[in-house]
Image: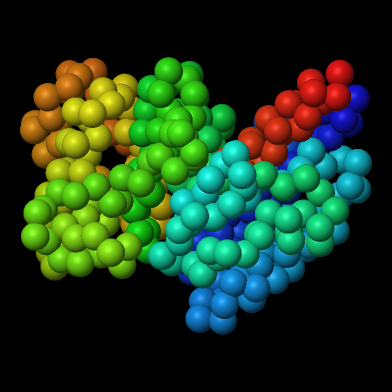
């Protein structure tokens, strides 16, 4: 059986500044990793080539029969069922058949998802979200993303586009966003001029999510979320004071997997997809 012989999976995390890939075993250990800069400003196919080259460094370290497949996270809205990118403001991938091109070059099954979803899946599988059925993963970096675990399942919405917390409107008439809207959580957070104003914006976004979803846990990761513990603590204090839903039982913590969350989540997705393929074959 393929799921018995596949010892490893390849997780790939595409970000606005870097692409990271890792060879991961079923226990969540990254055995080999490689990172490269995201070639912004050079078009979709330059980014896809960079993804493939980064992955090939990893796949050279294992036999194809040992690999369950590839989980690929991209900073974009992904129609999960169709495996197509609907919208991407950071990395120019709309219109390119990313999954097919990567799969054909690597000779492996590839499943693509939003990068914040895979960070949430990584924390659920190997990090702070283990054994927590209802939590929200917030990724703070070159943008704001979110992965929603509801009742023990990653919630993707009707077509896979759920979780765009960065594009919640939290200030009517606020500054314009690159997506075409205005007053969005992401734009206000990134444009905040002082640590206090930034904590207040983060808290406002958290309060909306808490009141809407009543999570047990909020995990904060991404480049900014991982490096700025003071910001997370200040926002957590404000959010728990202001939120209505379940604040007595809510925890807000930094991610435990650091910058590896997306890679580990990609690997977890690849392992899960391999199991589903085996079930289908049987």
Most extreme residue toward the bottom is 42
In the displayed structure image, the side of residue 241 where residue 273 appears, left or right: right
Q: Count numbered badges in the picture.
A: 0
Image location (x, y in percent) of residue 252: 28, 33
Residue 120 at what x, y percent from top left?
47, 37
How was this image coloured?
rainbow
Residue at 86%, 49% in the rendered image: 62
Q: Is residue 40 above or below residue 280?
A: below
The residue nearer to you, when weighing 150 against 79, is: 79
Of residues 246 and 61, which is closer to you in this image? Answer: 246
Q: Nearer the viewer, residue 226 or 275?
A: 275
Q: Quadrant of residue 240?
A: top left
Q: Residue at x 37, y 63 (%)?
A: 142
Q: Is residue 205 in sight in this rendering?
A: yes
Please give left or right for residue 22 compared with residue 217 in the image: right
Quadrant location of the C terminus in the rendered image:
top right
Q: Is residue 4 visible?
A: no
Quadrant in the picture for residue 56: bottom right
Residue 153, compared with residue 273, is above or below; it is above
Front one among 239 and 79: 79
Q: Position of residue 107 (x, y in %)?
A: 85, 53
Residue 161 lies, in percent from the top left, at 44, 43
Left or right: where does residue 68 sit relative to residue 227? right
Say which quadrant the N terminus sits in. top right
**Vertical side of 192 occupied by 84: above or below:** above
Residue at horizontal 73%, vertical 37%?
25
Residue 95 position (above or below residue 237): below
């Amino acid at each position: 059986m393929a799921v018995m012989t596949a010892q490893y999976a390849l997780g790939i995390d595409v970000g606005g500044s870097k692409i990271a890939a890792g060879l991961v075993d079923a226990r969540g250990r990254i055995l080999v990793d490689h990172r490269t800069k995201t070639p912004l400003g050079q078009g979709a196919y330059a980014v896809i080539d960079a993804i493939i080259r980064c992955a090939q460094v990893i796949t050279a370290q294992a036999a194809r029969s040992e690999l369950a497949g590839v989980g690929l996270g991209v900073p974009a809205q992904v129609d999960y069922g169709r495996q197509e990118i609907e919208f991407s403001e950071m990395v120019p991938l709309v219109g390119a058949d990313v999954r097919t091109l990567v799969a054909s070059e690597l000779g492996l099954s590839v499943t693509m998802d939003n990068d914040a979803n895979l960070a949430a899946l990584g924390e659920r599988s190997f990090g702070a979200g283990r054994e927590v059925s209802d939590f929200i993963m917030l990724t703070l970096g070159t943008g704001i993303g979110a992965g929603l675990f509801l009742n023990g399942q990653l919630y993707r919405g009707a077509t896979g586009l759920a979780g765009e917390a960065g594009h919640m409107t939290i200030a009517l008439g606020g500054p314009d966003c690159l997506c075409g809207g205005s007053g969005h959580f992401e734009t206000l957070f990134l444009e905040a001029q002082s640590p206090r104003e930034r904590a207040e914006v983060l808290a406002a976004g958290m309060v909306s999510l808490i009141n809407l979803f009543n999570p047990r846990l909020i995990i904060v990761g991404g480049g900014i979320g991982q490096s700025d513990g003071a910001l997370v603590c200040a926002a957590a204090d404000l959010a728990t004071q202001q939120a209505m839903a379940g604040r007595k039982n809510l925890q807000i913590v930094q991610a435990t997997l650091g910058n590896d969350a997306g890679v580990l989540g990609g690997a977890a997705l690849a392992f899960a997809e391999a199991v589903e393929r085996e079930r289908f074959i049987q």
